[in-house]
Amino acid sequence: MTRRPRFLLLATLAALSFGFLFVTVSCGGGGKKTLEKELIIFQTERDQADRDGNSEIYLVDPDGSNYANLTNTAGGDYSPSCSPDASRIAFTSDRDGKLRVYVMNIDGTDQTPITSGEGSDFTPVWSPDGSKLAFVSKRTGKQQIWVMNPDGSEQTNTSNSSASDRGPSWSPSGDRILFFSDRDGNQEIYVMNADGSEQTRVINNPASDWDPVLSPDGSRTVFVSDRDGDPEIYVMEADGSERNLTVTASTDWSPAFSSDGSKIVFASDRDDNAEIYTMNADGSSPTRLTGNAANDLTPEWCGKP
């Protein structure tokens, strides 16, 4: 059986939670709200009164201060992705009984579903120019990579395979999409053109590899693998060489580069429950940002320094 990170599948939790929003934004370009500095966005259970599992979307400073609850709903909210101009956030929510893709403003206002139907839709990711969202849908029975406009129009099955395809991530130029798939027997990383053509396996290893993300300059790919027994974060250089960035006895996953490529944010359960950490892009100086009894997951950078 393929090993999975123990907190990877939290998308079925739902309960009541309470929180307050304190986000500093600036207005420009006709009143559009954007972040004044680079923050980290993630999902967490930290504000629930009875710790019963409801997940919300939060922003936090890179030093672990100034938490801001953006969603604060009775449903579960997961997997946030920040638009390139830091004005909007796409995320997954089960508040209406099904997993749907939603979009909201950076201050948490105007939370709007942009997918519908019987199938589950989740893990949206913005393209580098903000014109598209890639996401995963089970509407055909298998998890597939789909692409749509940010208003939910023109939804297209891009990977369109008979396998389970997940974890989309755009190249910096927006012309390719990385993802992971079990189409060759075990879970490996693939790349395709943004229109779904030329689907190619990038890594070939007997172990499972997932969560691929390209660096902002496109020269490195970080990903997660269990090839050494525990899920760890790896990097693949432009020449195809690979090495560990984390070496622990715990689960490290969900890596994401900062806008300048100098830092990586990730989730880890090395301190018993899932928390958010940062490290330098070479794996040095891992630093814990969050610390509480809740699980903090799926981090991503939002805005620019």
Image (cartoon, helix red, strand yellow):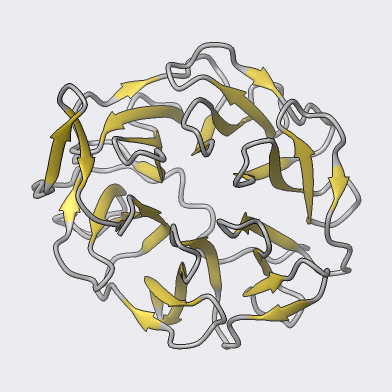
Position of residue 122 relative to residue 251, above or below, is above
Q: In which quadrant of the rendered view does residue 72 lie?
A: top left
* Residue nearer the viewer, 274 or 85: 85
Question: In this rendering, would 148 be left or right of 179?
Answer: left
Q: Position of residue 256 (x, y in %)?
A: 50, 60
Answer yes or no: is residue 274 visible: no
Q: Residue at x 62, y 37 (%)?
A: 174
* Residue nearer the viewer, 42 or 133: 133
Q: In which quadrant of the rendered view does residue 193 lie?
A: top right
Counting labels gives: 0
Question: In this rendering, would 298 be left or right of 21?
Answer: right
Q: Residue at x 15, y 25 (%)?
A: 31
Q: Position of residue 272 (x, y in %)?
A: 40, 81
Q: Position of residue 134 (x, y in %)?
A: 58, 32
Q: In which quadrant of the rendered view does residue 91 lie?
A: top left
* Residue nearer the viewer, 262 or 195: 262
Answer yes or no: is residue 27 visible: yes
Q: Residue at x 65, y 79 (%)?
A: 230
Position of residue 250 relative to residue 114, above or below, is below
Question: In this rendering, would 133 be left or right of 213?
Answer: left
* Residue nearer the viewer, 87 or 185: 87
Quadrant placement of the N terminus: bottom right
Quadrant placement of the C terminus: bottom left
Position of residue 160 relative to residue 262, above or below, is above
Q: Residue at x 83, y 56 (%)?
A: 202
Q: Position of residue 19 (x, y in %)?
A: 11, 49
